[in-house]
Amino acid sequence: MPYVIGNIPFFECFVRAEYTRNLGDRHGEFYPAVAHAVRSVRGQSVQFQVTFTDRHAGASFLLPIEALVWKPCDKQMDMTYVQPWDCFSNDFGVCELDFMKRGAVDILPGRFPGQYRFTIDWTGSDLADHFEQHKSGHLVFIEGGLIGMFPNNRVLWHDPAFWVTTTERPDFKSLSGEFRAEGNQQLFRRELSAPSPTLADSEQTDFFANGNGHSHETHDDTRFWSRPI
């Protein structure tokens, strides 16, 4: 299992040139490159090891996900549009889900079309190994040019050979507690009760309220789920 840095299925991309200049100049310029590895540090955006293929060909740079696009496009000022949650640990694994390989997806809440590429999953930290806090990150090429990484509750998958993708918001609730064969874990499993009258609906432990029911982030995620998908 990789620690801090590891290989990924490589992909061609463009780099926002200002990120090679400490954001000081060259805004609006793009350099073609190949991304071939990732760096994961807890509490930071996922970073990509890229090697340039045209201007500065052969030179490499380590860049955050927001610096990469699959085709030139405007920059999103809000990082939640490309990676809603930071990395959970320095220990991680990379997997290209065979069943979903190059599959079509919609990114919620705006149902932005995209294409799945691969998945990062974390372990080895309190957050990554906490049953209710854990998330995976699916790397997606989004229509328009952005490259993003999203957990399960931000992705709807398309495969017309197997299903017709829903047009409604799933009413899932996140699982709480541990699931183990030993240790009498069932005694400590928290079961969800009726919603508290002191909390708004958007504040309940809802699978689609804050990223699989997780609450360690402080930004308000309810804006993503206040309307049907």
Image (cartoon, rainbow, N blue to C red):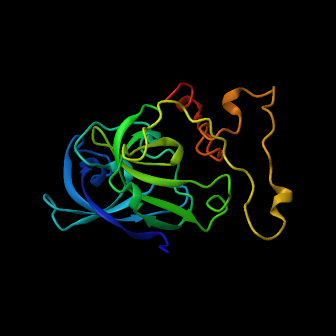
Residue sitting at 48 percent across and 69 percent down?
A: 4
- The image position of residue 179, as x and y in percent, is 72, 61
Image position, residue 73 (x, y; %)? 25, 39
Residue 109 in the figure: left or right of residue 177? left
Left or right: 34, with 125 as reference point: left
List x then y, in percent, for residue 223. Answer: 55, 29
Of 43 and 82, nearer the camera is: 82
Point out residue 90 in the picture as x, y percentages from the top left corner: 53, 66
Residue appearing at x 74%, y 59% in the figure: 178
Identity of the residue furthest to the right in this view: 187
Q: Is residue 58 above or below residue 136?
A: below
Q: Residue 10 is drawn in which quadrant?
A: bottom left
Q: Is residue 77 above or below residue 48?
A: above
Q: Residue furthest left?
A: 54
> Residue 203 appears in which quarter of the rendering?
top right
State the residue lying farthest toward the bottom: 1
Mark count = 0
Horizontal arrangement in the rendering, residue 189 relative to residue 92 (left or right) = right
Q: What's the residue at 69%, 49% (across, down)?
A: 175
Q: Is residue 178 left or right of residue 98?
A: right
Observer-nearest of 148 and 90: 148
Rendered position, 46 above or below 184: above
